[in-house]
Image (spheres, helix red, strand yellow):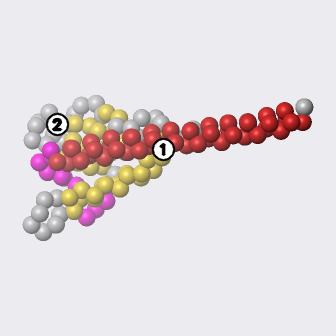
Amino acid sequence: MAIFGVSAVFLVSILTSVTRTQVRQASGNEVNSQLSFVSNTIQRLVRSASQVQNEAGVASTTLVLRMASSTLDPTYLYVDASSTAIFLQEATSTPIRLTDDKVTVGNFSVTKQEPAGGLAVVHVDLTLEYNTS
């Protein structure tokens, strides 16, 4: 009985450790996946924009892009007031949620920089956290 009890405790401990590692890995993968999606979307939109309307050198929680197409102009990328999601709104259309409820936004800040003689550069500071609630 004692050997069985010790073996059971040992096996439960291993199972708990493996499960905890699996959950940690899955949550990390989810955050990385959504971070990559948001980052790629921002890059694509900035490249296709005709102008970045944000004021140079000033950090903002909203990125305003002017687009050549009137159906897309202006395009906004922003974080909602409760920092739960990043949204994309093109012209007057309904905002589209870019992140789902599995993550929350720790930080979203964009800064436009205009180097002399070059194109505008957008610096994005973005932090996503796994939603443990």
Of 30 and 125, which appears nearest the observer? 30
Q: Residue furthest right?
A: 1
Q: Earlier in the sequence, mark 1 or mark 2?
A: 1
Of 36 and 110, which appears nearest the observer? 36
- Residue matched to label 1: 28
Residue 119 rendering spot, x and y as whole percentages:
13, 59
Give the class, few, some or many, for how many residues have Cα within 10 Å of label 2's Cα (few <14, many ≥20).
Answer: some
Give the class, few, some or many, for how many residues have Cα within 10 Å of label 1's Cα (few <14, many ≥20).
Answer: few
Vertical placement of 124 versus 44: above or below? below
Residue 82 visible in the shown view: no
Does 72 sit left or right of 3 as displayed?
left
Residue type marked 1: Gly
Residue type marked 2: Leu
Q: Regarding mark 2 in the picture, which secondary structure is present there?
A: loop
Vertical placement of 108 versus 8: above or below? below
Residue 53 rendering spot, x and y as whole percentages:
19, 52
Q: Quadrant of residue 89?
A: top left
Residue 132 rendering spot, x and y as whole percentages:
56, 40
Q: Quadrant of residue 77?
A: top left
| Disc number for residue 72 | 2
At x 24%, y 47%, the residue is: 43
Vertical placement of 54 versus 91: above or below? below
Does 121 sit left or right of 95 as displayed?
left
Q: Is residue 82 magenta?
A: no
The part of the chain drawn in magenta is 48-60
Q: CA distance from mark 1 to mark 2?
A: 33 Å
Residue 92 rendering spot, x and y as whole percentages:
22, 33
Does 57 sit left or right of 32 as displayed?
left
Q: Residue furthest front?
A: 3
- The image quadrant where one finds the C terminus is top right
Q: Is residue 59 magenta?
A: yes
